[in-house]
Amino acid sequence: MNYRVLGSTGLKVSEIGMGCEGFSENDCRMAQELFDVAEKAGINYFDLYAANPAVRKAVGEALVGRREKFLIQSHICSVWQNGQYKRTRKLDEVKTGFAEMMELLRTDYLDVGMIHYCDALADWEEIVTGGVLDFARELKTAGRIRHIGLSSHNPQVALKAVESGAIEVLMFSVNPCYDLQPASEDVEKLWAAKSYAGTLTNMDPERQRLYETCQRQGVGITVMKCFGGGDLLDAKLSPAGAALTVNQCIHYALSRPAVAVVLAGAHSPRQLNESLAYEHATAEEKDYALAFQSFPKINWTGHCMYCSHCAPCPQKIDVAYVTKFLNLALHQAAVPETVREHYALLSHHAGECVQCGVCETRCPFGVEIRQNMRKAQEIFGY
């Protein structure tokens, strides 16, 4: 298992994590089975948005004797009332729900306390002014949660939260179809057929800005909806009109700036092992670039996907990483120090580019790589 640092939290997280969708299967007995597979494989991070007390109790039981082997990302504001899930911003409900959750999980602390499901700007304002954010800060001060997070599907809202400095972790829906869609307060539009009816061109700029802002500010991203609820794995259901593989979906998500862990949904040990196979997959099995070219009505021309098809460079420049750092630096009044430091650590830099253009002949997306290398040399100085 490969591990990444989750933003500025200092937490080392497995790049494959667990979503909680399958914990309720087989009268919640699946939770124990999935945690057994996870522990053996080196998965140390999971998300728990489910408010069902039976699910939370099953997770708590599965963690007995191995709590310290797992980092828990669990959700504040996701509560269970009258036999059903409810998202709430009422402070008394939030506090009661948190206390019940901690008791069921049999733990004194959460590694990430995730403020649950914020897709509207007005909702974010309510979180800030209505006491929820203050409560999360109180919990952090008291050691009940170690880091504050927010879950969202809306890049506009997520960016507002990230730029506020209030959150340390963002749980966000990341996959190559959702990344084409503009910000919306209606999450259903990410799935709607009419959203993909026309020709879509390149990543939505607000999503690109969100990922890059998270990278600059040290906000780690934990990924949900990597497989689009499984739709991306089925050509008949995929908004792209073509199927992707598990490895391709995971690799796409892990290639985005600031992403630390993909929370793979699994309803059985077999499905979790399919995601874990990513750790041993070949570069060819992970490669998503050529698959993207086959998507009908989707055009990625001119946009670097960090797929590394341009390699190898005769000068041994890691073109994908140079381009990623260039994008992180562009449009800033000054190059962020962390970006400059990471660029400096590269073995070879843009200034070594001899403008031979070999990379451009290999790029599936027609990126003007030589121009990017000139820009990077200009911005970084070498």
Image (tube, grey):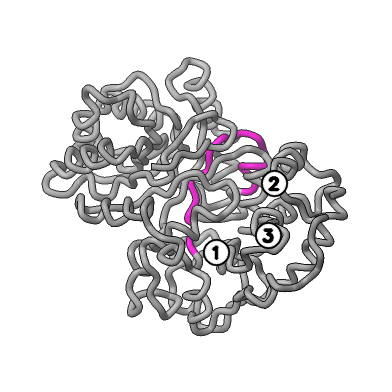
Mark 3 and mark 2: Cα distance apart in space: 11 Å
Residue 158: percent from the left, percent from the top? 58, 48
Element carrying mark 1: helix
Q: Is residue 26 visible?
A: yes
Residue bearing mark 3: 319
Q: Which mark is residue 347?
A: 2
Q: In the depicted view, which residue is nearer to us: 7 or 191? A: 7
Q: Which mark is residue 266?
A: none
Mark 2 and mark 1: Cα distance apart in space: 31 Å
**Residue flagged by tag 3: what amino acid is it?**
Val
Q: Quadrant of the N terminus?
A: top left
Residue bearing mark 1: 179
What segment is highlighted magenta in the picture? 159-175
Residue 59: percent from the left, percent from the top? 24, 34
- Is residue 51 depicted above or below 321 in this figure? above
Outermost front residue: 314
Contact check, label 3 and label 2, Cβ < 8 Å: no
Q: In the depicted view, which residue is nearer to us: 315 or 275? A: 315
Query: Which image quadrant for residue 60?
Result: top left
Contact check, label 1 and label 3, Cβ < 8 Å: no
Element carrying mark 2: loop
Q: Nearer the viewer, mark 1 or mark 3?
A: 3
**Residue flagged by tag 1: what amino acid is it?**
Asp
Query: Which image quadrant for residue 235?
Result: bottom left
Disc 2 packing (10 Å; few <14; some 14–19; many ≥20) = few
Q: Residue at x 20, y 32 (%)?
A: 62
